[in-house]
Image (cartoon, coloured by chain):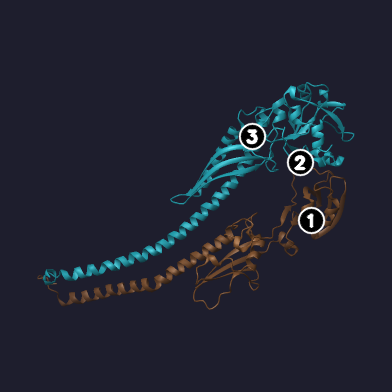
Amino acid sequence: MKIIKEEKGYITSIILLILLIPVLLLMIIIIEEYSEDTNTTIQNIESEKIKTKTEDFENEIITISKETLHNVTLDVITRKKALTNSRTYLKKIIQEKINEKQKKYGAENIIINTEVKQIESSNDPFKIEINYIITSTANNSNIKIRKENKKLIDITDTKYPVYDPLPTLKIGATIKNNQINFQDKLAEYIESENNTAYTNAKTSIIIKKCPYSDYIQHGNNNQTITNCLHNHYYHNSHDGLCLLCRLENKTSCNHYGIETFILPTLEYDKAPASIDHVLLNDKNNQYDGNKIKINNKTILYLDNGHKTKYGL
Amino acid sequence: MNNKGQIIITDLLLYIIVLTIILGLIIFSMTILNDSQVTRINNKQLNNLLDNSLETLTETSGLPSKWEYMDNDDIKTVGLKSDNNNFISYQKLMKLKNNKHLLDSYFPSGVAYELTLYPKNNENSRMLIAGNYLSNQKQVFSKSEIILIDYGYNITSFYKDNNINSCYYNHNKDWACKPFTISKSLLNEGEYYIITNDNIEYILSNTYSENITQNGKGIININNNLKQLIKNENETIYLHITSHNNDTYLVYDKNNMEEHLNNVIKPEVYILNMKVAI
């Protein structure tokens, strides 16, 4: 072979080069192995971090929604102006607040992107449903989480009380110390006979769920119904309006809604029924109820349907 | 090297030294790849197996849901996380403890495993949950998780909420009053307790103006009191409590686990340890 016979001494360098190749290859394999190990560990930690942060953020969405419902209802009763489309309005406000919060997470190197798809009434009228799509990732990472989820927002959380906008929107009632004082306004709004039964009537402004969940128990004794009336609790009702329709100042609502008693101040044998969706309804949809004397200070006017419902 | 390209003696020496170093490196690398590499891959696989199985156990609830009440053949995956919170379900742990080989399919043949549980402050009272105690194995990998146990109680805290509505006795701020809907069937299937580390006076009242007033501290079983007050299938009962701190709870236990009720106020921290070995 010519290369072996040649006399310029290249054999040494060539053999050295050939020998260096497997060494380099072996070195690369070992380094690769170790770096892959490290990468897997880094990826695991990163994915765990993204997962936890996403779950944290989903909880934040609930808090943001509760806070928004509190602020929006307060704003509506203060301005006495109904929303044209409460679902779109709430969606917009919640989305804005979520975007702000997302920026804070961005500062921690976690990129979260939430799109609020829908705000809707739920089967439980004391809850609002929020649908969203959340995607999250970290800077310089190929791990990405995407999920479509829905959460139910409780509107009776005492930390974020939600206000009933209907009395203020419907008849411009004034609010003082978390109470609505109708003064003459409700009596004037009602066109039926004995409307003066509701002169200076008062009701609560905060939506609170009645604890007597079997409504028929209200009639078991005077203490129970008095306690319910005194606390101005709200009850499930097919005829009542849901919160979202209340914000729009509607008179009827296709969703499962809520109702509360409005306490009359004057005693008659018969007067318009003391239920908010009756008194605050269109004038031709108001109906009368018979007197029920709870105690010396408290009376109610109820139709047969509501009497049976509350066991009175 | 001279100008004719012939090797002189110093070059030859240098060449031999470099050649020896390179050959040494090749032999060294080959040894690593032949011996340690195999072990390392094994180690890596075992570590992954350990990580994944412990993660599946502590972070998932298992399939199908409520697998702890099913026959072993119907169980698809074993996960110990409670369906209600991030604690480990006591019922699931016990199901696994009574069927120690439910996890066998997680591990390839030739790999032994051991899942044990012990209180953080008492390592000696170690309890075997699944697998067999490991002994005489060459390589053992171990990983632990700190856990809290959910005994399946339904717990309601009696914190004093300033926004709380007034009860029908118009109790002042010294009282915490909360209504509960209780059904006859729940009352027959389980036990209601008030758990407190304070001396309390409590009143149970129904919607028929009937009430029962008592004092107590610690774990108080109120089932008989409730039975006296319940007239219908579902009844709203008001529980009025005077308490100077917020450590008072209403607890419903349907699994007959009175002995663990102390955990409601002071949950005991446990360590779940998994070992795999070949």
Q: Is residue B174 visible?
A: no
Report, in whole angstroms, how far the alpha carbon at label 1 lies from the one at label 2: 26 Å
Task: From the image, state whether disc 3 or disc 2 is nearer to you.
Answer: 2
Task: From the image, state whether disc 1 or disc 3 is nearer to you.
Answer: 1
Disc 3 marks which residue? A72
Q: Residue B175 location in percent, x, y?
A: 81, 49
Q: In this image, B12 relative to B118: left or right?
A: left
Instruction: Identify the subunit bearing mark 1.
Output: B
Disc 2 marks which residue? A210
Q: Is residue A7 above or below residue A270?
A: below
Chain A palette colour: cyan
Q: Is residue B21 above or below residue B55?
A: below
Task: From the image, state whether disc 1 or disc 2 is nearer to you.
Answer: 1
The amino acid type, in three-letter code, at marker 3 is: Val
Disc 1 marks which residue? B188
Report, in whole angstroms, how far the alpha carbon at label 1 lies from the one at label 3: 45 Å
**Residue A199, numbered circle:** none
